[in-house]
Image: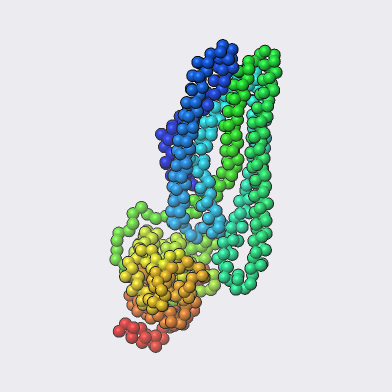
Amino acid sequence: MSAAIALGRRERSAGRLADLFLSTVALYSLSLALPIMTLQIYDRILPSDDTGTLTLLIAGVLVALALECTLRLMRAYMIGWAGAAFEHRVACAAIEHLMAADLSRLPSHGVAGSVHRMAAIGQLKDFFSGQAITTMIEVGFVAVFLGLIAYVAGHLALVPIAVILIFGALVAFLGVRLNRRLRARGETDDLRYDFLIETLRGIHTIKAMALERLFSRRYEAFEASSCRANYAVARTASTLANLGTVAAHVMIASVVGFGALMVIDRTLSVGALIASLLLSGRLMQPVQKALHLWIQYQGYRLIHEQAASLFSVPTIARPDEAPSARAKQGELILQDVGFGFADDDWLFRHVDLELRPGETVTLSGDKGSGKSALLKLIAGVYPPGEGRVLIDGSPTVAFAPEELMSRVGLISTDGLIFRGTVRDNITRFGVVPEAQAVDVAKLLGIDKDLARLPDGFGTRLEGTLADGIPPGLKQRIAMTRALALKPKVILFDNADRGIDQQGYNLLFSLLGRVKPKVAMIIVSDDLNLQGLASRHLILGPDGLTEDDRTAGSRSNVQFYRELRV
């Protein structure tokens, strides 16, 4: 997170800090014009009836007020721009970090938690855009105002000092309570967001099973907890804010009361009293801003922890230099590979395998043995916990993602559809040449199915159950995306599940066509797909063992020969 914050701070150069400092000093220097003018009017001009000097003073104060307004607008623009730049840079850095993250080490806070933490970045900008710095500079003027009050009114300066000390003690006490309640609200909101997103994901299933009332009641319970937490935070925060207003009124009343006594005792002039009163009002402005900053800081500490958790996910280490360009050969080598979602809880270890173009193996194992994890590891989705995975002689982590996807194609059970058109999905949003992707789509019969739709390949998909195309067609679209770059290593992970009969036949035919040219690992319960392989491997905790059964029947061999012809 510190590196990301440093990246976000890059826009905040020394020149900008100097501009903020000088503009703040100028603003508060100009704000002294009215108290000084008041002191001069009541103590010098009115007793002497000097109207010429009064006119000049009024003109000077008006000019000072105009300059103050202009400076405030300019400073607000600078702070707003710096905050937007910070949010943009850190949010982009967070997305880039997550794109390079080790998915096997993702935290368990869920999708809603990640969204909540991304939103937290926008709330950090007030502390890195210059707003906090200007507030601290303004707080420094409290001493200047107190010094001026002491200069013009003597012991009367003790009154605002006493009010500020009492006010500060109360703020510190309430700040601890506010921080505790903010943490409780954050935990409650994470649970509510997770439930909401999971409910919306499965809304069709919920409606099909008539569970709307049950889920509504459950959400009401989460909403009630969230409301109670928000109420507790709002009550404490409003108490702090109201405390600042009360302190300002108490200060004005105290200055007026004690100052009036000093005027009666002839130890203070009326002009000095009015000037002290104006200075006291000005003095409370930075104090109230500091209070607001303090309230924000209680939430900032929690927000900073949430945003930092985005950057705490380990990333896949990639070398600075990509491996030398080699033709796609389809050679797959696993050397003593081990993997687990926790370092002390291995799914499997000591996995060794060599696979070359034209070789196809099936992979089986007990439920939870890590078959899908092994395929994702080969595809570069997960890095190996130990050992090496080599594609064409180079480790998978050495390839750029685009290059690795052109060498390895993973066809998974749940083919993911992205929001966009069918064309966007099969071409990876323009990364793959459209003609090349359409050729693969034709082999899977997608073009014929889309010809029945008004927009064809331009049909828009949302990636949800609300899409107007059958699940089997969605699965073939996802397969097309995986195979569009014509990878030399194909990983098949039960992708035949949920596909219709026509799609199954086309898929089987396609795999038979590419079998002599690629290295292929098949995970499937389908006997026909298993018949494509010449070897059968079983995955266990201690690696791969080979089953000596015959993988392909004579009829399958004859079928492959016909396909080659």
Classify 129 as above or below 446: above
Q: Position of residue 238 (x, y in %)?
A: 65, 42
Residue found at x 30% / y 84% = 565
Would residue 360 be seen by someone viewing this image from the given angle?
Answer: no
Would residue 478 be seen by someone viewing this image from the given angle?
Answer: yes
Judging from the image, the colouring scheme is rainbow
Is residue 214 found left or right of 358 in the rendered image?
right
- Please name whichever residue, 83 or 33, is drawn nearer the observer in this view of the structure: 33
Is residue 274 found left or right of 104 in the rendered image?
right
- Please name whichever residue, 109 or 31, is drawn nearer the observer in this view of the structure: 31
Q: Position of residue 476 (x, y in %)?
A: 43, 74
Residue found at x 47% / y 41% = 80
Q: Position of residue 193 (x, y in %)?
A: 59, 58
Classify 558 as above or below 291: below
Q: Position of residue 322 (x, y in %)?
A: 33, 57
Residue found at x 58% / y 71% = 205
- Please name whichever residue, 355 or 189, is drawn nearer the observer in this view of the structure: 189
Residue found at x 60% / y 70% = 206
